[in-house]
Image: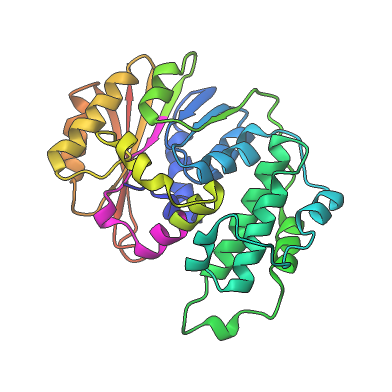
């Protein structure tokens, strides 16, 4: 399974989410499958306390950098440390998997920068550095065989520095925002004193965009410096909402189980994609079996993405 990470960062998608959330009253929010941190950052601007979680380390790292972090930034000295000898080949790759994603020169850069990030002084600085590294990877992956000639003859270190210059200052909402890296069910079971659950339901793997899935896969392998974790992760996630599911009935059953775990949270906003696997009516029925529904909001993205978004709100 994968969350709608590729779409949730777009202006239109985020605007739809915010337009619904403006109608709700809350001072704190739990994001059990946070994905990209855009929504959490906006909610910080609304002075909401944000608790973000994601089983993927790349998403957790971004939440650390932009949601949990209220004040820390990367300095010029930090960049010098990060980019020191970034292109110098070592005796061996820490993460040889990078060679399956990049040419050898770029692979050395990503391997060395990943190692240098661990030398930074604080967890938030490390998270910011790794988030910028992912953005450099997004830049590389934005080109394909037909467009690679358009890639500017910049070193990846220069791309990194340009991205650093574009970073907005951290949002300080004077709240103790948190980020975690665990399963959604475990996160919700431990979440207390929070007003709103905002749950982006994962999309079935078979329905995911292949390029988006490719980008998210390399991010996770870069973060973990290996690909050997996939087998163990699949075993751990078996029978969970963010795992692969065989049938619609299994998928809906996992949603219902997760919502029962979140029954102590007074307000829900459940977001999903209607793309043919589960219909809006089936999702509405699933949620209504657990709690009375207040409202259903939809937005058509069919021209751009071939899908429709739906957000269901329900209060205890």
- In the displayed structure image, the side of residue 241 where residue 289 appears, left or right: left
Q: Vertical placement of 275 versus 235: above or below?
A: below
- In the displayed structure image, the side of residue 234 where residue 116 appears, left or right: right
Q: Vertical placement of 74 versus 174: above or below?
A: below
Q: Position of residue 16 (x, y in %)?
A: 43, 47
Q: Position of residue 24 (x, y in %)?
A: 44, 28
Magenta stretch, residue numbers: 198-216
Task: Identify the residue shown where x is 45% and y is 30%.
Answer: 182
Q: Position of residue 214 (x, y in %)?
A: 42, 61
Q: Is residue 203 magenta?
A: yes
Q: Give the color scheme: rainbow, by chain, secondary structure or one colour.
A: rainbow
Task: Identify the residue shown where x is 24% and y is 34%.
Answer: 239
Relative depth, front residue between 223 and 63: 223
Visible residue check, residue 3: no
Q: Residue furthest right?
A: 77
Q: Vertical placement of 23 versus 195: above or below?
A: below
Relative depth, front residue between 154 and 101: 101
Task: Identify the residue shown where x is 59% and y is 72%.
Answer: 104
- In the displayed structure image, the side of residue 193 where residue 265 appears, left or right: left
Q: Is residue 124 magenta?
A: no
Q: Residue furthest front?
A: 91
Residue 264 in which image quadrant: top left
Visible residue check, residue 228: yes
Q: Quadrant of the C terminus?
A: top left
Q: Vertical placement of 280 versus 160: above or below?
A: above
Relative depth, front residue between 230 and 312: 230
Task: Identify the residue shown where x is 39% and y is 49%.
Answer: 4
| Count of numbered tags | 0
Q: Position of residue 194 (x, y in %)?
A: 48, 18
């Amino acid at each position: 399974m994968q969350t709608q990470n590729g779409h949730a960062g777009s202006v239109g998608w985020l605007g739809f989410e915010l337009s619904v959330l403006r109608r709700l009253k809350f001072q704190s929010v739990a994001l059990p499958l946070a994905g990209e941190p855009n929504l959490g950052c906006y909610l910080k601007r609304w002075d909401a306390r944000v608790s973000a979680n994601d089983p993927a380390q790349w998403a957790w790292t971004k939440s650390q950098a932009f949601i949990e972090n209220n004040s820390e930034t990367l300095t010029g000295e930090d960049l010098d440390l990060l980019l020191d000898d970034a292109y110098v080949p070592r005796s061996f790759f820490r993460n040889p998997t990078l060679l399956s994603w990049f040419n050898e020169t770029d692979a050395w850069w990503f391997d060395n920068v990943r190692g240098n990030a661990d030398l930074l002084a604080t967890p938030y600085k490390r998270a910011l550095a790794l988030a910028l590294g992912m953005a450099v990877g997004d830049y590389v992956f934005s080109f394909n065989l037909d467009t690679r000639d358009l890639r500017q003859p910049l070193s990846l270190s220069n791309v990194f520095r340009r991205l650093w210059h574009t970073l907005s200052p951290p949002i300080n909402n004077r709240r103790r925002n948190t980020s975690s890296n665990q399963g959604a069910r475990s996160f919700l079971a431990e979440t207390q004193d929070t007003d709103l659950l905002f749950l982006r339901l994962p999309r079935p793997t078979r329905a995911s965009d292949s390029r988006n899935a490719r980008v998210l896969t390399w991010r996770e392998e870069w973060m973990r410096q290996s690909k050997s974790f996939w087998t163990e992760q699949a075993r751990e996630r078996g029978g969970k909402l963010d795992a692969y599911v065989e049938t619609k009935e299994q998928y809906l059953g996992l949603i219902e189980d997760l919502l029962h775990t979140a029954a102590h949270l007074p307000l829900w906003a459940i977001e999903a994609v209607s793309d043919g696997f589960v219909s809006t009516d089936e999702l509405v029925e699933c949620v209504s079996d657990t709690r009375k529904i207040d409202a259903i909001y939809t937005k058509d993205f069919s021209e751009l993405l071939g899908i429709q978004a739906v957000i269901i709100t329900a209060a205890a």
